[in-house]
Amino acid sequence: MYITPFYAAILVFLFIFLSVRTLRLRRKLQIPLGDAGNPQMLRAMRVHSNFAEYVPLALLLMFMFELVSVLPGPAHIFGICLLLGRLSHAYGVGQSSEDYRYRVFGMAMTLTALVGSAVGLLVVYLLQLVA
């Protein structure tokens, strides 16, 4: 049984939450496109966009790693890192008086999932070359 679809499903709900939050703010502030120079709108947009920029690649790498690996543990570690990272980043950047610790932790966890998956893929690939 694959592990990545579990994390993908959970992350979809976070993406939908961020999308609805951004849409509601657009309606409230009457900003149909862009941020209109409003810092609150810009924050909401960047939280949503940042999620959309990082999560697909991370999930793709996780799944590829899962396909070539025989160990389920690392996939769970990458998934947990990605989920915690995206939650922390969204919370931190979403605050008008931002506490950068949430943003830094969020990006560190997200990058851990990305780099961990990529390194795992390379290790498995190289091991197969020498075998």
Image: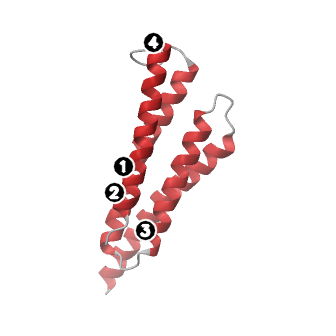
**Mark 3 Cα shell of 10 Å, populated few (<14), some (14-19), many (≥20):** many
| Mark linked to residue 60 | 2
Query: In this figure, which residue is indicated by the disc labeled 3?
Result: 75
| Quarter-of-image position of residue 71 | bottom left
Measured from the top left, where is residue 66 in percent x and y?
35, 69
Q: Earlier in the sequence, mark 4 or mark 2?
A: 4
Q: Are marks 1 and 2 in contact (CB under 8 Å)?
A: yes
Query: In this figure, which residue is indicated by the disc labeled 4?
Result: 30
- Compared with residue 64, is residue 52 higher up or lower down, i.e. above or below? above
Q: Nearer the viewer, mark 4 or mark 2?
A: 4
Measured from the top left, where is residue 46 in percent x and y?
49, 32
> In the image, 111: left or right of 64?
right
| Mark linked to residue 56 | 1
Q: Earlier in the sequence, mark 1 or mark 3?
A: 1
* Marks 4/2: CA–CA distance: 36 Å
Q: Residue at x 32, y 69 (%)?
A: 2
- Compared with residue 118, is residue 1 higher up or lower down, i.e. above or below? below
**Mark 1 Cα shell of 10 Å, populated few (<14), some (14-19), many (≥20):** few
| Quarter-of-image position of residue 109 | bottom right
